[in-house]
Amino acid sequence: MNQIKLLHHSDGAHGWVEVKKSLFNQIADINNISSYSYQDKQSYYLEEDCDAGILIEALEKEGRPFMFISIDDGHPSPIRDYDRIN
């Protein structure tokens, strides 16, 4: 099974883990995500302190290998202008 590459975005004050909506919706329930996470048309940007843990637990439960790639978005991150999930 191929390793899933997750982008960890940060802006010096906070961070989010980017995951494709199609993947997340297969393995987890979006209703469990807080209003501190964001979305665009194709991806969710899960708040790093609590919501990203839901994704990580779901991937581990499924036995799907993953890795993080860190991205510094500068301050402020453009993610802050995306729509909130809730």
Image (tube, rainbow, N blue to C red):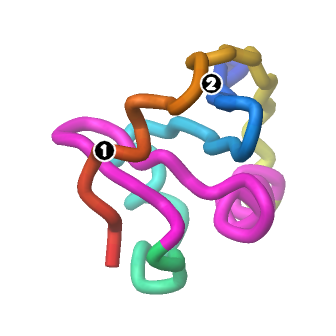
Q: Residues within 10 Å of mark 1 (few under 14, many from 20)?
A: few
Residue drawn 57% across the image and 18% down it: 73
Q: Residues within 10 Å of mark 2 (few under 14, many from 20)?
A: some
Indicate the position of residue 61 as horizontal and vertical percent values. Answer: 79, 62
| Residue 46 higher or lower than 9, as above or below | below
| Residue 86 higher or lower than 22, as above or below | below
Residue holding disc 2 = 7
State left or right for residue 6 relative to residue 37: right
Q: Is residue 22 visible?
A: no
Residue 38 on the magenta span: yes
Mark 2 secondary-structure assignment: strand
Residue drawn 71% across the image and 46% down it: 14
Q: Which residues are magenta?
A: 36-60
State left or right for residue 28 relative to residue 68: left
Q: Nearer the viewer, residue 11 or 50?
A: 11
Residue holding disc 1 = 81
Q: Nearer the viewer, residue 4 or 82?
A: 82
Indicate the position of residue 27 as horizontal and vertical percent values. Answer: 53, 61
Residue 83 on the magenta span: no
Tell me the kind of residue under disc 2. Leu
